[in-house]
Structure formats: C-alpha cells, structure tokens
Amino acid sequence: MTSSGPRADARADPREPDRDCGRCPRLAAYRAENRGRWPSFFNAPVPAAGPSAPSVLVVGLAPALRGANRTGVPFEGDDSGTFLHAGLDRAGLDRSGQAGPGAPALRITNAVRCAPPANRPNAAEIAACRDFLRDEIAATRPRCVLALGRVAHEAVVAALGRRRGDHGFSHGARHEIGALVLHDSYHPSRQNTRTGRLTAAMFDDVLARLARDLGRPEPR
C-alpha cells in the first residue's frame, strides 16, 4: 500500500485538530515532552489518511508513540500497522486510492488523535476527540466502519449518537446503524497478536464479512 505521508498542517482539514490542540492537558503535556525527546517525530495529532470518499473507514485506538506518532500516518511504523496492512492487502482493500475502478477505497483514523502515555487514553480524552471522529464519519460517509478494539467501537457508536448498550463490542460482531455497517475486531496490538488472541485467520474472517457487505467476492 502506498503511504499518503505525514501532513505538517492537519488543520488544513477542519475535521482534524490543530497541531497544538489543547483539549486534553495530559496529552498536550506528553506531546510537548516527546517533541523535546524526539524532535524528528511527527509529535502532533495524527490526521486520517486515505481517499476522501472511502467505502471503508478503519478506526483504531490512538497513535502509538513510535508508530503513527513518529510517522504522522495512522498505523504506519509499528507491528500493529504491519499486521493491519497485511490483512487489508489480503482482502483487496486499497488506501492509496489508485487501485482502479471498482476497488473499495479505504481510509484510516483513530478514536484519539494524539499519542497517550502507555498507549492508554482516558475516558475524558476519548470524549474530547469525539467531535473529530463524528465529523470524519459524516463527511466521508463510508458504507462500512471497521472498529479495532472496544474503545474504537464505543467511540464510533457514541459518534453516531447511539447507545453503547444497544451495540455491544465483540470480535466479529456486525452492527447495522442506519445506512452504515459497523464491524468489530480485536485491536491488532502486539499484545493481542503475539498471544494469539487475534490471529491472521480471525482477522481475515472479519474482513470476509465486511467484503460481503461491500458486495465483493470474499478474500481467499
């Protein structure tokens, strides 16, 4: 897959937070600390990446410190991204926007745009970023959303104005929410993939169901 590369001025897109967004004091302080420690890293809210009119929007948790926080592109630069992209490639999902007519375009973002300490955003930080996720979904109007993990799932449900209790998270679950279909997968974190909680075959099964919703042959 072709990387869209980091964007120095995410605020050029009003759906994205400002580079020095101060909504979350803890995350802003951590961002400032990392800018001093690793000045070559992106170290800013990581914008969504991919075509502007996707068939599928993938929503993760938050940028990893040495992954998307370094590269400026969601799910690039770490093991989680390697696992995710391998599965998307097997499913024939394209983030470059260059796969040709009929190929389902894909866009990737996170429920929380800034890297959190220990990869754990708190509830207030997830809520503070909800507007950006809501605007992303409303503007791009994907047919399907793939939520990677419980936090991403619950953030999507809240962004759509639905009750969490009506749409519980479980790996492989499928939720019809208006015209949109939400698919759930465990997050492809190293902790999940190395312990076998999430295997490539399990992820492929989720993507096969998603492919059916897109009216495509299931990946083999």
Image: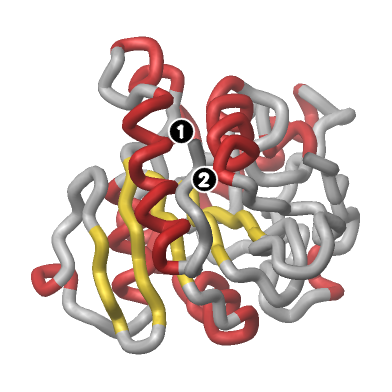
- Element carrying mark 1: helix
Is any part of residue 33 visible from this angle?
no
Q: Crowding at label 1, few (<14), some or many (≥20) Cα neighbours within 10 Å? A: few
In which quadrant is the N terminus drawn?
Answer: top right
Q: In this view, does 218 lie above or below 84?
A: below
Near-viewer residue (158 or 86): 86
Apparent side of residue 214 relative to residue 127 in the rendered image (left or right): right
Q: Which of marks 2 and 1 is nearer the N terminus?
A: 2
Q: Where residue 187 sits in the image (x, y, percent)?
A: 39, 37
Q: Where residue 144 sits in the image (x, y, percent)?
A: 46, 68
Q: Is residue 150 above or below residue 163?
A: above
Q: Where residue 84 sits in the image (x, y, percent)?
A: 55, 35
- Amino acid marked by disc 2: Ala
- Residue lying furthest left: 165
Q: Are the two marked residues, 2 and 1, in contact with CB atoms closer than 8 angstroms?
A: yes
- Could you say which disc has been placed on residue 62 in the image? 2
Residue under the point 32% across and 88% down: 178
Q: Where residue 86 sits in the image (x, y, percent)?
A: 60, 30
Residue under the point 41% across and 48% down: 208
Apparent side of residue 165 relative to residue 74 in the rendered image (left or right): left
Could you give the CA–CA distance between mark 2 and mark 1, rounded to whole angstroms? 7 Å
Residue under the point 63% across and 79% down: 140
- Could you say which disc has been placed on residue 140 in the image? none
Q: Crowding at label 2, few (<14), some or many (≥20) Cα neighbours within 10 Å? A: many
| Mark 1 lies on residue | 119
Q: How many labels does the image show?
A: 2
- Amino acid marked by disc 1: Asn
- Residue lying furthest top: 194
Residue under the point 87% across and 55% down: 7
